[in-house]
């Protein structure tokens, strides 16, 4: 059994202040212009912990939307190349829901695979996740279909669960979680409290493992993918709000005399995704790129990295301009794969 | 009275069109989704209500949709304007599409060609909603420094997902300037400079072409009011060049045409 403490809502300010004083950058859900997003906080004033889900995910903490990697300059015949060292400030992600906590396992699997990623790895190593069980969800949440759940502790260093309006139970799950408690001992009280409040009821809609097994059979069925993706506009919204999408692009920008190498997010929705220099694109059609999105997350990543590329947060579907509902599409695919359609 | 569904199913049954591009109920009570109906039975699922705000004309240029054959499109006022703008920009042929016009009062009319679309559009009221006008006036009235701050904050959220571009029927360039990297016109980073350049370049490219459907801002996951930029530029295009987009199927694009009697000295 993990160790438990009590954290009063009233002590959140003290906790954030202590962490900040200890040199930690604290990111937490706050409300801004009517939207809840993870932002850097130095006090508890703007915390919006009763949220269902933020619009964009917290992945930018370890995989920013753009990152400078190199600078180079040419003066006459002299060329200088300067590396931009990765910035990885010690960071606490406070109040992220279990799906977001789980997403770091996918990011870790991708960015530590093979040679490891010099920019992402140190940020992952500097991150502590204080999760928060979900009191409510919405129709777009499907964590329980992809191995997660509203009180799932995987990926959390500490998991907070509401005992009542004013108190959380804090489960300390890792060494890193313990170290965080040590930075702000005054904010935590001893004890486990009574039973936590019930969490959101998210009914499973399909079995991810079965889907993973059956997807390769559907790969060649062009009509399925066309039918699902005909309305897709081919933008980057679903990939950019997603906590587990990791595709990136590297570009040199400015001029040949003064340039920077920048890494930015990429998205499989875009028409020029995987476009070759020759002009050939192995995924030239939107339906092929939609298939890639589904196969990558639910077939290739589980096969290669033993982790799903989706945590069921529902962000892609909430943000899609044409109401592409991933949970619904997956449910259909699972049913098709099972031969009941 | 004919309804949207009976119209759609009649067109399909008669073989006049192969596909009807319309709206279906979406994931919840606040969402509709585009639908591509090719069989008469499915026509019953078509809807038209307040949720149906997306400009469906955007699909007329998509190769996957084009491949389905001649289309009928369910059109609110802005979608009708888009058809005219498409014709003016040589994107669609005069008889390429059947417009199923739905007016504000729910009246459904079939517009078999672009001449009929033009007549129909001319009869419809056009203009900004009080909310849009008030927001533009508010920003216009801000001192320059504050206006800059407001836009910097607004555009600061942009992460270059290009949903605005994808949803916009007039953003149809096969290779967008922002995707060109030799030379690189627009900084790729979603930082203040990159975001400003992207959004301003996009707005400029739509000046005098934007049909004011609002689909760009509706699509933006970051809730950025890019529609306001386009609306102000549409206003400026009318003031400076006397042309509004989407009124005629034969019209020169203000920023790409030349008149010997132009009022500006420098260009003559
Ligand atoms: S599924 Fe939606 S968000 Fe994703 S690329 Fe297509 S239109 Fe954009
Ligand atoms: S694919 Fe969609 S539901 Fe899955 S993790 Fe990404 S944003 Fe969330
Ligand atoms: S710029 Fe926006 S409002 Fe104008 S036509 Fe494009 S999507 Fe519609
Ligand atoms: S849709 Fe919004 S966030 Fe995406 S590129 Fe356009 S303005 Fe930026």
Image (cartoon, coloured by chain):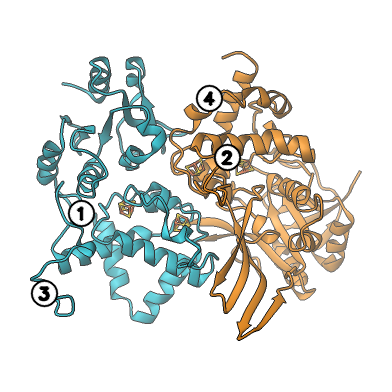
Which element carries disc 4, helix, strand or loop? helix
Say if disc 1 is inside 8 Å of ligand 3. yes
Specify the colour of chain B.
cyan
Quarter holding the C terminus of chain A is: top right
Q: Is residue A190 above or below residue B100?
A: below
Which element carries disc 3, helix, strand or loop? loop
Foreground mark, 2 or 4, reads: 2
- Alpha carbon separation for disc pair 2 and 4: 18 Å
Q: Are marks 4 and 3 on the same chain?
A: no
Disc 1 or 3, which lies upstream in sequence?
A: 1
Quarter holding the N terminus of chain A is: top right
The residue where tag 2 is placed is A282
Instruction: Estimate the x, y position of residue B28 in percent, counting from the top left.
Output: 46, 34
- Alpha carbon separation for disc pair 4 and 3: 57 Å
Instruction: Estimate the x, y position of residue A274 in percent, counting from the top left.
Output: 58, 47
Specify the colour of chain A.
orange
The residue where tag 1 is placed is B245
Contact? badges 1 and 3 (CB < 8 Å): no
Which element carries disc 1, helix, strand or loop? loop
Q: Bin the neighbour count of mark 1 within 10 Å (Cα to Cα): few under 14, some 14-19, many 20 and up.
A: many
Q: Is residue A242 visible?
A: yes
Q: Residue at x 12, y 67 (%)?
A: B259
Contact? badges 2 and 3 (CB < 8 Å): no
Identify the subunit bearing mark 4: A
């Amino acid at each position: 059994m993990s160790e438990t403490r009590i954290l009063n809502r009233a002590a959140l300010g003290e906790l954030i202040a202590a962490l900040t004083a200890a040199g930690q950058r604290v990111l937490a859900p706050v409300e801004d212009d009517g939207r809840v997003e993870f932002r850097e906080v130095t006090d508890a004033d703007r915390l919006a912990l009763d949220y269902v889900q933020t619009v964009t995910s917290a992945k930018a903490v370890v995989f920013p939307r753009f990152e400078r990697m190199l600078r180079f300059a040419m003066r006459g015949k002299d060329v200088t190349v300067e590396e931009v060292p990765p910035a990885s400030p010690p960071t606490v992600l406070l109040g992220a829901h279990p799906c977001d906590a789980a997403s770091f396992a996918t990011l870790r699997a991708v960015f530590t695979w093979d040679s490891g990623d010099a920019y992402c790895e140190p940020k992952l190593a500097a991150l502590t996740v204080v999760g928060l069980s979900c009191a409510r969800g919405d129709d777009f949440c499907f964590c329980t279909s992809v191995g997660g759940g509203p009180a799932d502790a995987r990926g959390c260093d500490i998991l907070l669960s509401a005992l009542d309006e004013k108190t959380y139970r804090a489960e300390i799950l890792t060494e890193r979680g313990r170290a965080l408690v040590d930075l702000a001992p005054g904010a935590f009280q001893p004890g486990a409290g009574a039973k936590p409040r019930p969490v959101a009821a998210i009914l499973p809609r399909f079995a991810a493992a079965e889907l993973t097994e059956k997807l390769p059979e559907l790969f060649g069925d062009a009509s399925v993918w066309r039918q699902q993706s005909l309305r897709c506009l081919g933008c980057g919204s679903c990939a950019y709000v997603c906590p587990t999408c990791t595709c990136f692009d590297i570009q040199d920008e400015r001029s040949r005399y003064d340039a920077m190498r920048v890494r930015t997010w990429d998205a499989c929705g875009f028409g020029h995704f995987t476009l070759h220099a020759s002009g050939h694109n192995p995924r030239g059609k939107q339906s092929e790129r939609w298939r890639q999105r589904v196969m990558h997350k639910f077939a290739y990543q589980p096969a290669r990295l033993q982790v799903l590329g989706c945590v069921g947060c529902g962000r892609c579907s909430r943000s899609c301009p044409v109401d592409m509902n991933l949970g619904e599409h997956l449910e259909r695919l699972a049913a098709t794969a099972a031969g009941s359609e | 009275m004919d309804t949207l569904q009976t119209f759609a199913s009649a067109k399909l049954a008669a073989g006049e069109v192969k596909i009807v591009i319309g709206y279906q109920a979406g994931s919840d009570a606040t969402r509709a989704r585009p639908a591509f109906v090719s069989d008469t039975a499915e026509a019953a699922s078509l809807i038209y209500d307040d949720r149906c705000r997306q400009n469906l004309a955007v699909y007329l240029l998509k190769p996957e949709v084009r491949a389905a054959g001649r289309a009928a499109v369910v059109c609110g006022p802005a979608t009708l304007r888009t058809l005219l703008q498409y014709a003016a920009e040589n994107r669609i042929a005069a008889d390429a599409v059947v417009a199923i016009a739905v007016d504000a009062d729910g009246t459904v009319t079939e517009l078999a060609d672009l001449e009929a679309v033009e007549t129909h559009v001319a009869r419809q009221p056009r203009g900004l909603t009080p909310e849009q006008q008030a927001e533009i006036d508010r920003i216009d009235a801000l001192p320059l420094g504050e206006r800059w701050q407001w836009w910097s904050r607004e555009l600061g959220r942009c992460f270059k997902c290009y949903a605005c571009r994808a949803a916009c029927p007039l953003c149809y360039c096969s290779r967008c300037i922002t995707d060109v990297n030799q030379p690189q016109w627009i900084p790729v980073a979603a930082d203040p400079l990159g975001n400003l350049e992207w959004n301003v370049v996009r707005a400029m490219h739509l000046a005098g072409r934007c049909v004011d459907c609002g689909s760009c801002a509706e699509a933006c996951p970051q809730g950025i009011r890019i529609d306001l930029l386009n609306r102000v530029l549409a206003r400026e295009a009318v003031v400076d060049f006397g042309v509004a987009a989407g009124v005629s199927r034969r019209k020169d694009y203000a920023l790409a045409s030349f008149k010997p009697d132009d009022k500006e000295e420098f260009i003559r």
